[in-house]
Amino acid sequence: MASTAADQQTKARRVLPKRKRKETSYFPSDSETSDIEAADVQQDATDTAIAPLNKKAKITIPPASTKPVAKKKIFPFTTLPAELKNKIYADALTSNHEVPLIYKLQRYHHVAELGDTDSFQKFMRNRHYRYYPPFDQLEVFKPSFGPNFLLLNRQIHAETQPILYGANTFAFEDTKALHAFCATIGPKNCASLRRLVVRSLGYSDASRAMIHPAFTVLASAVNLTRLEMACPIFYRDDGKRVAREFYRYSYHWLEAVGRSKGSVDAAVDLVVLGKQNSAHTDCSCCTEEKRVERVTTIGNDFQSELRGLLGA
């Protein structure tokens, strides 16, 4: 009886076998780690392939080469014959028309600016001149030449300077533009000038006050071949009175040319009066022959009186 009770107690205390289940681990094994790394590498490769489609590709510009250009690639322009270079200079710096220059005030500086014939007409209308110069017969144009050519180097500047100032005809809207131009280019370049045209002497007392300073600065231009006064000199229809008015403002230039040429009246032959100095040129009752005769008479009286004033 005792053994039977002990056996039953032993059966009651028997431990049941554990259920078989897969072991759970919270740390990846070596095989799993290698699989994860392979998947990451594949994902990175996929992202890299897709990235250029989503983002703009950066354009990298290679830096400019700082190496000097080989001498064999530079055209030896400065070594060309003088005859050939002068022809190139003339084509680049010479205008087939007059070079119109207009007075401007820029940053408190008096300058002469390159204009065109249309701006000349607007200038005359805006200033309310009593007598308009004959700009209607002029073609509207703007000179096509490059004065910046002088800025290449010192040698080209020295070679082209006489061509620029000596081969062109410069037309000034008034004596203010003439004064600003001559004061800017200096006495050396003024000596290279050959042909000038003055379109007006002034439209007010302040403007007429610049006539004498303009011709004083022009005293360096002793090599002029023609000075055309294409404007009325205070609307005088008398050659002698016109000569006195002209001498009053330009005697510095007249005497400087006389000293340079060795003849006191050498400048008289350089001055050409425009037909605006005759009040009969616009008269409808006068024939063309009378107009020409009147202009010729005024011109002869002008020259004879100017020679007398110079002491010839």
Image: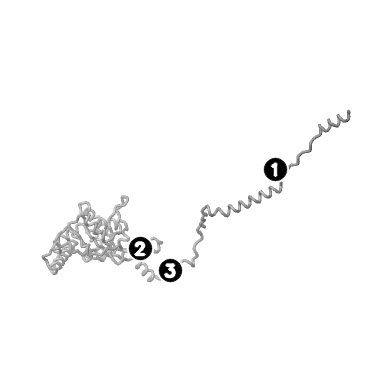
Q: Which residue is mark 3?
A: 79
Say what amino acid the circle numbered 3 marks: Thr
Within 10 Å of disc 3 (Cα), the crowding (few <14, some 14-19, many 20+) is: few
> CA gap, disc 3 to disc 1?
85 Å
Image depth: mark 2 or mark 1 in front:
1
> CA gap, disc 2 to disc 1?
83 Å
Looking at the image, tell me whether mark 3 or mark 2 is earlier in sequence order: 3
Picture residue at 19% right of the left edge, 59% below the top: 132
State left or right for residue 98 relative to residue 6: left
Q: Is residue 57 above or below residue 140?
A: above
Q: Nearer the viewer, residue 28 or 131?
A: 28
Within 10 Å of disc 2 (Cα), the crowding (few <14, some 14-19, many 20+) is: some
- What is the quadrant of residue 170 in the picture? bottom left
Q: Nearer the viewer, residue 103 or 158?
A: 103
> Does any portion of residue 64 appear in the rendered image?
yes
Say what amino acid the circle numbered 2 marks: Gly
Q: What is the x, y in percent for residue 160? A: 36, 64
Say what amino acid the circle numbered 1 marks: Phe
Report the residue that reaches farthest toward the front: 1
Picture residue at 87% right of the left edge, 30% below the top: 4
Q: Nearer the viewer, residue 92 or 182?
A: 92
Q: Using the image, tell me which numbered label, if any, was put on residue 27.
A: 1
Q: Using the image, tell me which numbered label, if any, was put on residue 146.
A: 2
Q: What is the x, y in percent for residue 171? A: 26, 61
Instruction: Report helix, strand or loop for mark 3.
Output: helix
Q: What is the x, y in percent for residue 172? A: 26, 59
